Image (cartoon, helix red, strand yellow):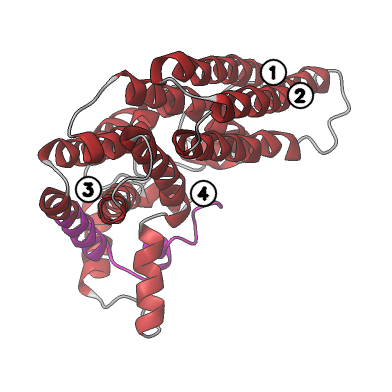
Amino acid sequence: MNSNPRLRDQEGCALSTTSRPEHASREAELDARPSKGRGLTRTIAAYVALTKPRVMELLLVSTVPVMFLAAGGVPNLWLVAATVIGGAMSAGSAASFNMYLDRDIDKVMKRTKNRPLVTGEVSPREVLVFSWVLAVVQAVWLLAFTNLLTVFLSTFAIFFYVVIYTILLKRHTEQNIVWGGIAGCFPVLVGWAAVTNSLSWAPFVLFVLVFLWTPPHYWPLSMKYAGDYDATDVPMLGATRSGAQVGLQVVLYAWATVVCSLLLIPIAGMGLVYSACAVVFGAWFLYESHRMYAMSVRARTGAEQGSEARPMRVFHASITYLTLVFVAVAVDPLLPF
């Protein structure tokens, strides 16, 4: 038997070494007892942490620039604020549901062992209620200030991340992040729909761009934390395959990402600023991806000192690349060339 087995949630996602009654009893105790509070500030911080603010920031980085592109200039700033607030609640709801469902593996992984549900800052019941409240409020908010299409896209993103990725894919296939990453592509559609109440080819190109970017962004991170994923039996590609195999996949997806970014030029009529940024930053992203792959191949021969830092270089480069490309998406419509 695996020395670090997964504990089965009440939803039944994984194996457990304890009996169902015992596990259910512990869950009931957590729900019944007050959360370990240290005052209002600590409680607020715990609930904010449930929304995964760093992930949320990355999602919203893609929303605002697309609104500039959809408007062909500066969009209504109140509409931007309303969309960002609604999008933040949507992303926060999905993240909170994810923490509720993954609480058994979060307590095993070093990277996630300090999350508020694991430490007892909040109880499972409180997290579940918080998740549903955010999901409902974001829908009402976006319906009040945007349109029905935006509400549908934002709500469907929650469903996809929670049900398709977290429940159906994450623990069952090493390609989980590829298809699960679709949820992270929806902010570009949400931003476009909020401005135009419609969809067109331009936001779909950006949707595919984020979809292709997700694997070379996340797999390097999973390489660094391969031990964590092994301990939980989550079949993440970065943990189940060799560095060279993962590196090759990163290179292929990086190339596809950059090519997709160039497709936006003719489809959306992008100007010089975006075109230059897509080429220059794309070349840098490809360089970092190829560098990691080359080092992974050479590592097979022996000297591997410092190899742990190499995948994280691509991880951070991917964030910078996507941010700069979307900044260019926002700036380009404001310029006459």
Q: Which of the two labelled residues, at mark 3 and mark 2, occupies the earlier sequence position?
A: 3
What's the CA distance linking mark 2 and mark 1?
11 Å
Q: Which residue is mark 4?
A: 109
Residue 217, percent from left and from top: 55, 32
Q: Sort mark 1 into few (<14), some (14-19) or many (20+) by Cα contacts within 10 Å.
A: some
Tag count: 4
Q: Which of the two labelled residues, at mark 1 and mark 3, occupies the earlier sequence position?
A: 3
Camera-side residue: 145 or 228?
145
Q: Quadrant of residue 268?
A: top left
Q: Sort mark 3 into few (<14), some (14-19) or many (20+) by Cα contacts within 10 Å.
A: few
Q: Which of the two labelled residues, at mark 4 and mark 2, occupies the earlier sequence position?
A: 4
Tell me the kind of residue under disc 1: Ala
Q: Main secondary structure of the magenta part?
A: helix
Q: Which of the two labelled residues, at mark 2 and mark 1, occupies the earlier sequence position?
A: 1
Q: Sort mark 4 into few (<14), some (14-19) or many (20+) by Cα contacts within 10 Å.
A: some
What's the CA distance linking mark 3 and mark 2?
44 Å
Q: Which mark is residue 291?
A: 2
Q: Decide: is 319 above or below 280.
A: below
Tell me the kind of residue under disc 2: Arg
Q: Is residue 162 magenta?
A: no
Q: Is residue 130 magenta?
A: yes
Q: Which mark is residue 244?
A: 1
Classify residue 314 as left or right of residue 260: right
Tag 3 and tag 2, C-beta contact below 8 Å? no
Camera-side residue: 310 or 328?
328
Say which residue appears at 36% left-offset and 34% top-offset: 72
